[in-house]
Image: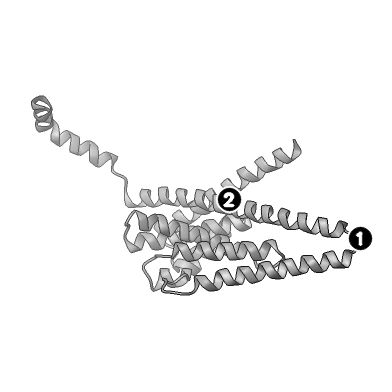
């Protein structure tokens, strides 16, 4: 212990210089965070589509049995009743999630007028409700929910790390960019949308993380899409 104390006493200035050289700048930290958010966006897109496909297979299996029955009209009516019943359940799930106190779930509001905190529980309940609706024939879009889930997951990670509101806002914007890029396979559109609509700022220190998050999310989407095509071919 005495030798270690003597070593630090003699070399503390050199150790401080090494620490300063290894310390990341704020811009570098933002780029690293944007990379992580891009990976989250690609994975959210993958998991969401897998859940939809699984639920659709269950629904199609029920319909296939019904359509194989001698009375096709009865099978169709049964399927229609099943779909309406499932959509009512989805509406009930969404309605119960709106009861009680919760923070704002609007991307623009939490960035422009808020502190960048999106409620994670509310986003998950909306995701379950949308999955039930889409898989049973409901005419709602998938892309908006993928964008919202990615932004909420990015915001939740920042909340767990106890980061400042300015960084949470950037994470929400990166999540929106990554979600749009993964959902539409359009990295440029995702970055421009997040910069112009969500942040309202095209400065390079903010635009660069948005571009990186969009590109990474598109790459993750492409990797898994190529893998699924290869598995299907085999």
Viewer-closest of 108 and 105: 105
Task: Name the N-terminal-most of marks 2 and 1.
Answer: 1
Coordinates of residue 118 in the picture (x, y in percent): 43, 65
Image height check: is 196 above or below 53? below
Note whether residue 198 is visible. Answer: yes
Q: Quadrant of the C terminus?
A: top right
Say which residue label 2 marks. 218
Coordinates of residue 22 in the picture (x, y in percent): 29, 39
Note whether residue 204 is visible. Answer: no
Horizontally, residue 103 falls left or right of residue 145, namely left
Coordinates of residue 20 in the picture (x, y in percent): 24, 42
Q: Secondary structure at mark 1?
A: loop
The image's mark for residue 114 is none
Image height check: is 26 above or below 173? above
Q: Which residue is found at the position 57% from the left and 56% from the top?
A: 181
Coordinates of residue 226 in the picture (x, y in percent): 66, 42
**Comparing labels 2 and 1, the label whose residue is closer to the camera:** 1
Q: Residues within 10 Å of mark 1 (few under 14, many from 20)?
A: few
Say which residue label 1 marks. 70
Task: Determine the residue located farthest toward the top in the rendered image.
Answer: 3
């Amino acid at each position: 212990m005495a030798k270690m104390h003597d070593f630090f006493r003699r070399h503390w200035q050199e150790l401080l210089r090494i620490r300063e050289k290894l310390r990341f700048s704020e811009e570098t930290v933002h780029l690293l965070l944007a990379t992580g958010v891009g990976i989250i966006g690609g994975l959210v897109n993958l998991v969401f589509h897998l859940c939809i496909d699984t639920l659709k297979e269950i629904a199609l299996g029920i319909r296939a049995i019904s359509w194989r029955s001698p009375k096709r009209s009865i099978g169709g009516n049964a399927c229609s009743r099943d779909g309406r019943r499932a959509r009512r359940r989805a509406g009930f799930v969404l309605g119960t999630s709106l009861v009680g106190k919760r923070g704002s779930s609007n991307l623009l509001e939490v960035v422009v007028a808020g502190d960048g905190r999106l409620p994670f529980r509310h986003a998950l309940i909306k995701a379950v409700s949308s999955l039930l609706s889409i898989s049973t024939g409901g005419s709602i879009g998938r892309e908006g929910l993928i964008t919202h889930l990615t932004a909420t997951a990015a915001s939740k990670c920042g909340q767990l790390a106890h980061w400042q509101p300015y960084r949470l806002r950037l994470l929400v914007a990166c999540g929106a960019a990554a979600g749009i890029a993964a959902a539409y396979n359009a990295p440029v559109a995702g970055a421009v949308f997040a910069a112009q609509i969500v942040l309202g700022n095209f400065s390079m220190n903010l635009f660069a993380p948005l571009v990186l998050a969009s590109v990474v999310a598109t790459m993750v989407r492409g990797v898994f899409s190529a893998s699924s095509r290869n598995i299907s071919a085999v």
